[in-house]
Image (spheres, helix red, strand yellow):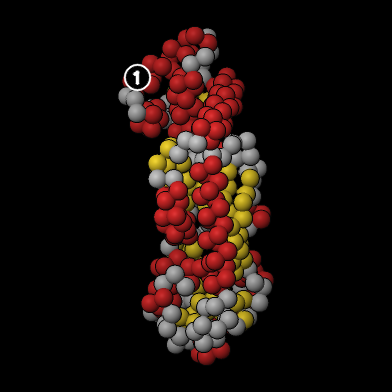
Amino acid sequence: MDLKQLEYIVAIANHGNISQAAYAMFVTPSGLNQQLKKLEDELGVQLFYRDKHNVHLTEAGRIYVDNARVILRIKKNTYTMLNDLKGNTVGTLNLGLTHEHGIDLFTSVFPSFNKKYPGVTFNLTEGIVDRQHELIKNGSLDFGIVMMGEQDKINLNYIKLYNENLILGVSRKHPLARFAAPPGQPLTTIDLKEFRKERFSLIFASSTMRKIVQPVFDKAGFQPHLLIETAMNHALVKMVAIGLCCTIIPESRAFANPMYNDQVAWFYLESRPNWNVYIACRKDIKLSAAAQYFIKLAQEYGATLSQSFYKN
């Protein structure tokens, strides 16, 4: 059995498009299409339905690809164990990152990682949690940094890095800002009902964070008057700082922009909405020694960050 051929077919299934799969596999679309046709002729079955732009697995294709992924995982695990046995310190790790949180964590721990494993490079892919889950499941990512509540877990292995509260931010010019704790002191708690008449800017509706934030408004008995929705927490902080709205964002993101600390008042909410930050990976994948070291550094970073929350 040709393992490279298996990789080609899995790539086509992952991308749903021969041109995109060819680009990812560093071959020409015509060459990849020929490989597919050759395999289908050998098997005597059609693996993909084709339309003008995309391809879709047939029932035979699903059987082939499911088993191809198993074989490729066995290969990957075998090579990982052999490389660790040899003390091999070169290779590539495919890491998924959420916007802002993920890249901050990565850049904080990478210098220490690079000192021990200078020959290991990273391919970084930014994506929302659902997209990372998909890429981890199909093997495109070795692991990913994800932020979510317990209800969003799927059948993957989750290694907890830290927990953080989602906190309310209001302009320092707001009348209720006078109840906020002074900078450097633990945050005070406030009832969200006090802000039912205010405008809010929030993270986008399909995000895992919004799934945690929305029940907070439900419990407070009102739906927010939305000004904007965005994927960028720093944009939310700036909108609050200039007095346009209120927001609810993770504690780490609230204090990632110290230039706005004197313009935004932050509060804990009575219901204490929170989420966990995890490393997610497949349960059947053997993580290399280098990957495990990166996770160890990420856990240490998370512990340090958690301590800093109570000092802001």
What amino acid type is highlighted by mark number 1?
A: Gly
Residue 13 vertical position relative to residue 120 in the rendered view, above or below: above
Nearer the observer, 292 or 169: 292
Q: Is residue 55 among what the camera can see?
A: no
Among the 4 quarters of the image, the one containing residue 275:
bottom right
In the image: residue 51, left or right of residue 186: left
Nearer the observer, 13 or 278: 278
Percent position of residue 274, x then y: 62, 66
Percent position of residue 56, x then y: 49, 27
Residue 194 vertical position relative to residue 281 in the rendered view, above or below: below
Among the 4 quarters of the image, the one containing residue 71:
top right
Percent position of residue 160, x then y: 62, 55
Identify the element where label 1 is drawn.
helix
In the image: residue 108, left or right of residue 194: left
Percent position of residue 195, x then y: 56, 80
In the image: residue 253, left or right of residue 274: left
Q: Which residue corresponds to the image point at 63% horizontal and 39% vertical from the top-left?
A: 283
Q: Is residue 276 among what the camera can see?
A: yes
Q: Name the residue tied to disc 1.
A: 31
Q: Which residue corresponds to the image point at 43% horizontal and 12% vertical from the top-left?
A: 38
In the image: residue 286, left or right of residue 122: right
Residue 86 vertical position relative to residue 6 in the rendered view, above or below: below
Residue 61 vertical position relative to residue 291 in the rendered view, above or below: above
Q: Which residue corresponds to the image point at 55% horizontal and 59% vertical from the top-left?
A: 300
Q: Residues within 10 Å of mark 1 (few under 14, many from 20)?
A: few
